[in-house]
Image (cartoon, rainbow, N blue to C red):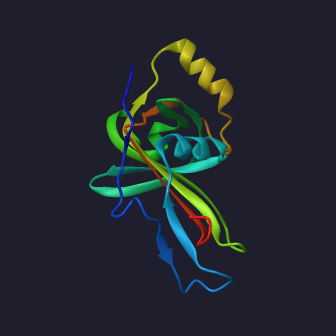
Amino acid sequence: MNIALRQHNWPNSEEATTIGGMGGEGSRKLRELSAADSLERLASAQYGRIVFSRRGLPIIRPVNHIVEPDAVVVRANLGASLLRGDGQIVAYEADDFDEHTRRGWSVIVTGVARVVMDPEQTQRYETLLDPWINMPMDHVIRIETEIVTGLELVDDLDA
């Protein structure tokens, strides 16, 4: 499946947004990341947070993941997490911030979550994904990367 990535255009995305009053040395700016840079940073993270809705309320669960060119893949216990994996819209977020330098990044992928049904693909993902929780993970969930947004907090001089 070939999915075109759509990147959110933040207001004044041509210019970074200055963040002041943070304490520490120097000011910081928010710089928008390209979809490719966002996915590269996401792939470098060891875990993230899947966000989905149950009865109209948001639910957030930490999980580890792998990133493919058109998807983020996680393992889940569908009964415990209430994630259906039947085509529901979800968000997946990961970030990395250094509290001392006050630099870092945040990436959010929004897309459709589906249970991987192909036995060969499921086996491959189960081998690549080792859940951190001592709990059976009975499904592999593939989140299509339909919308990819990323922001980086950088020194004012780097923006």
User: Is residue 128 shown left or right of residue 9?
Assistant: right
Compared with residue 25, is residue 93 higher up or lower down, i.e. above or below?
above
> Image quadrant for the C terminus?
bottom right
Where in the figure is residue 100, as x and y percent of width and height? 72, 74
Residue at 60%, 47% (x, y): give it. Answer: 41
Q: Quadrant location of residue 112? A: top left
Residue at 52%, 29% (x, y): give it. Answer: 69
The residue closer to the viewer here, 152 or 113, is 152
Residue most toward the right?
100
Q: Quadrant location of residue 97? A: bottom right
Residue at 48%, 14% (x, y): give it. Answer: 118
Residue most toward the left?
56
Where in the figure is residue 125, as x and y percent of width and height? 60, 25
Compared with residue 83, is residue 28 higher up or lower down, i.e. above or below?
below
Mark yes or no: residue 64 visible: no
User: Is residue 26 shown left or right of residue 56?
Assistant: right
Where in the figure is residue 133, as x and y percent of width and height? 66, 45
The residue closer to the viewer here, 47 or 14, is 14
